Structures are given as structure tokens and as C-alpha cells.
């Protein structure tokens, strides 16, 4: 019997060693979202805990058998007993240490939140923004259930938890956003200011987490200057109004916003010049060169629902003029507005505009009615890729 136990124990040692070394690797790439990360952590601690326990039992059995009368003798046997002794002591210590981490992690285990897949009837539940990925390969649209992604003429669900993003702003290394967290994500309600550098797979909390939700937010594509319209006082902003940060939300400055009639419901920031910001509302479009302290009207006759700066610094203005949906482009060196052709719209208007950072000829627009169009010639022609939130035929 002792010989059988000894043989089993000797074979168990390499198995447990392999378990400790490689057991967690297949799972390490599978986590997708905050709760999955929590579950992965518990899984890893569990693997290591079980591995150390197996090693402890194996070494202790070998040590116990080696001390029995009639066992091996001599210097070689003494070295083996010493090895077995230190083996069970070290593995016991490993089991106790990993167990101290593993057991508390068990209370955090729960199923990862269900991630609704995109189906034709529900590609875009809502449209809360528009932007291209930094490599220009994907068009990202924050919807009610996370990001919808258009790539290679196909729609798919974006990575990460299905947050209800609001105030979405694409930049050269990811995007900034606000909104509401997905159930089970482990994030506080509301999101405050968050940032992703991996197309939504993970989020970094920047500021005002669990405190404020910003539906009107914009950021400089290269400068990363963030502007928000704050709807009510909070711990970082004393009053309602326009605020901006030039240091990734570490400090905030309030802008006087002189010259703007009414509350802005769309903002845009120049890609590289942090002091230049545009705003729009039912009374027109406005432009500021002093961080929003003062604005000059640039399109009083346009009920402005979208403003957007191209990477060249040209300002796009979308909205309604009279009873017609329109899109204009303002040359940065003049005050001249050039009207661009857009698809015919009935009781609808452009609400978001985006330019492909790798192909300035490619523009995207989204409307209130959840229609999405792509143009490969700066607005000369358009292709509909979503029709009232559904995949376009």
C-alpha cells in the first residue's frame, strides 16, 4: 500500500507543477468586461490554490513514507527526505497564501452579464454618438446596449460590457464617453467621464464616477481637450454650464459661454487647437476661439443639431434650415459656409457626423431616426447602412 501511495505521489508532483504553470493560460484571454475580469481573478486563485494543495499532499505523503522503518537508507535517502520535507512546507505555505486570496474572491463570483447580440431588428436601439476607430477600420456607434460596430460592410456587436454610452467622443487613441453602466459591470451609476483605448473592451474611470452623466460632451481628436455641458452642480463643478479640462479631467475650468443664446445640445472641439470649440442649438451654430468664454454666431438661420471638426479643422454643421435637412462645411480661413449634398430626409435631421482618420474622403452621418449613411467622396454621394436602426437593404 505504501508503495502504491509513493508511486501516485511521485506522479502527482509534475502534474501539479504543470497545473500551477499552465492551468490558467486558456482562460486568460477569454475575459470580456468587468465581471468577467472578477471571475477570471477568482478562477486563477482557485487554480493556484488547488495546485498547491495537491503538491502539499503529494510531498507530505512522500515524506511520511520515507520516514517509515524499513525505508531507504543512506545519504541519498536523507537528501530525498529533506527535499520532501521542504516540499510539503513550501507547498503548505503556498496553499495558505493563495487560499487567503481565493476564499474571499468566492463571494464576488457571479455570472457575467448577458450580452444581447445584434439582430437585424435591433442593430441600433438608440444612437448616442458616432466615430471611427483610430485605425479607421471600424465605425463605432454607441447605442443603448454598448457599441454597435460597422466593419467590412457588416454590423456586429462591439467588445466589452454593454454600457448605455452618452456623450461619445472619438480621439486618436480611443474615445471618451459618459452614460450609464451595464448591469453586473461593477461600475457606479452614472459613469461620469470614462475613456477606452481598446474600442470599448475596457474602460478607465477619469472623473465624477457615480456622480454625473454628461449627454453633451466633445473632445479634441489630438489635443484630448474635453468639453462638457454640465446639467447641474456637482462636487467638481459649482454650477450648470460649459466646462473644459486640458489634463484628462484632473482639473476643470468653467467657460462664460457669452454670446450663446440658449443651452447647447451639441459641441465640437478643434482636433489640435484646444481653445477652439463650436456649439449648436435651436438658435444656430456658434464658434469660440477662447475656450468657450465668448462665442460668435456663424449660422443663425440653421436649427443646429450637429457640429463636428474634421482633422483639417473644417467645421461641419448639420441641422434644419427652414423645413429642409441640411449639412454645411465652414472653411477655417473664412466665414463662408458651403452646402453639401445629403440624402433626402423627411421629418429627420443629422445628429452626428464623423470623419475617417485614415481616409478624409470618408464621412459618416447619423440621424434622429437612426438612419446611418457613409460617403466615400466627402458628401458627393451617400450609401445608407442603417435604416431606422435596422440593417439597410
Image (cartoon, helix red, strand yellow):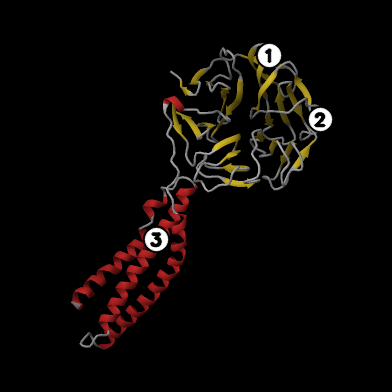
Q: Residue at x 42, y 28 (%)?
A: 119
Q: Quadrant of residue 167?
A: top right
Horizontal and vertical percent position of residue 287: 75, 27
Q: Secondary structure at mark 2?
A: loop
Position of 175 with respect to 282 (left or right) is left
Is residue 153 in view from this perspective?
A: no
Q: Earlier in the sequence, mark 2 or mark 1?
A: 2
The local secondary structure at tag 1 comes to strand
Q: In this rendering, is residue 5 above or below 387?
A: below
Of 59 and 109, the residue lying toward us: 109
* Residue 79 image offset from top left, x and y in percent: 31, 83
Name the residue that disc number 1 marks: 321
On the rendered image, what quadrant is the C terminus found in?
A: top left
Using a 10 Å C-alpha cutoff, classify the residue at mark 3 as few (fewer than 14 neighbours), some (14 to 19) or many (20 or more).
Answer: many
Mark 3: which secondary structure? helix
Q: Is residue 333 visible?
A: yes
Residue 255 placement: quadrant: top right
Instruction: Work out how far the residue at label 2 is from the one at label 1, CA to CA, in angstroms.
Output: 24 Å
On residue 46, which mark appears? 3
For the point 25% across and 68% down, which residue is it? Answer: 11
Tell me if residue 96 comes above or below residue 125 in the rendering.
below
Amino acid at each position: 500500500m505504501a508503495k502504491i501511495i509513493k508511486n501516485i505521489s511521485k506522479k502527482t508532483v509534475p502534474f501539479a507543477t504543470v497545473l500551477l504553470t499552465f492551468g490558467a493560460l486558456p482562460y486568460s484571454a477569454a475575459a470580456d468586461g468587468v465581471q468577467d475580469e472578477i471571475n477570471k481573478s477568482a478562477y486563477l486563485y482557485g487554480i493556484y490554490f488547488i495546485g498547491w494543495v495537491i503538491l502539499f499532499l503529494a510531498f507530505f505523503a512522500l515524506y511520511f513514507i520515507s520516514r517509515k522503518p524499513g525505508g531507504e537508507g543512506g545519504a541519498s535517502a536523507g537528501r530525498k527526505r529533506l527535499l520532501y520535507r521542504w516540499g510539503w512546507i513550501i507547498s503548505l505555505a503556498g496553499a495558505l497564501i493563495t487560499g487567503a486570496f481565493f476564499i474571499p474572491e468566492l463571494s464576488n463570483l457571479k455570472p457575467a452579464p448577458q450580452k444581447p447580440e445584434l439582430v437585424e431588428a435591433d442593430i441600433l436601439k438608440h444612437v448616442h454618438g458616432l466615430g471611427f476607430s483610430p485605425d479607421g477600420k471600424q465605425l463605432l456607434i454607441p447605442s443603448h446596449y454598448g457599441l454597435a460596430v460597422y466593419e467590412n460592410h457588416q454590423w456586429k456587436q462591439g467588445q466589452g460590457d454593454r454600457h448605455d454610452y452618452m456623450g461619445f467622443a472619438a480621439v486618436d487613441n480611443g474615445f471618451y464617453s459618459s452614460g450609464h453602466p451595464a448591469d453586473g459591470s461593477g461600475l457606479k451609476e452614472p459613469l461620469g467621464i470614462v475613456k477606452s483605448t481598446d474600442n470599448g473592451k475596457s474602460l478607465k474611470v477619469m472623473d465624477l464616477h457615480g456622480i454625473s452623466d454628461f449627454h453633451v460632451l466633445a473632445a479634441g481628436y489630438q489635443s484630448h481637450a474635453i468639453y462638457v455641458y454640465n446639467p447641474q452642480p456637482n462636487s467638481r463643478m459649482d454650477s450648470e454650464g460649459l466646462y473644459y479640462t486640458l489634463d484628462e479631467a484632473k482639473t476643470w475650468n468653467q467657460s462664460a459661454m457669452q454670446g450663446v443664446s440658449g443651452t447647447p445640445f451639441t459641441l465640437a472641439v478643434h482636433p489640435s487647437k484646444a481653445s477652439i470649440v463650436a456649439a449648436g442649438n435651436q438658435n444656430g451654430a456658434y464658434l469660440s476661439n477662447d475656450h468657450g468664454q465668448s462665442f460668435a454666431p456663424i449660422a443663425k438661420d440653421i436649427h443646429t443639431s450637429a457640429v463636428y471638426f474634421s482633422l483639417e479643422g473644417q467645421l461641419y454643421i448639420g441641422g434644419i434650415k427652414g423645413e429642409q435637412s441640411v449639412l454645411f462645411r465652414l472653411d477655417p480661413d473664412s466665414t463662408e459656409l458651403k452646402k453639401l449634398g445629403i440624402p433626402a430626409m423627411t421629418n429627420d435631421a443629422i445628429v452626428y457626423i464623423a470623419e475617417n482618420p485614415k481616409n478624409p474622403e470618408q464621412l459618416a452621418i447619423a440621424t434622429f431616426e437612426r438612419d446611418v449613411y457613409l460617403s466615400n467622396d466627402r458628401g458627393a454621394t451617400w450609401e445608407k447602412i442603417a435604416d431606422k436602426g435596422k440593417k439597410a437593404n
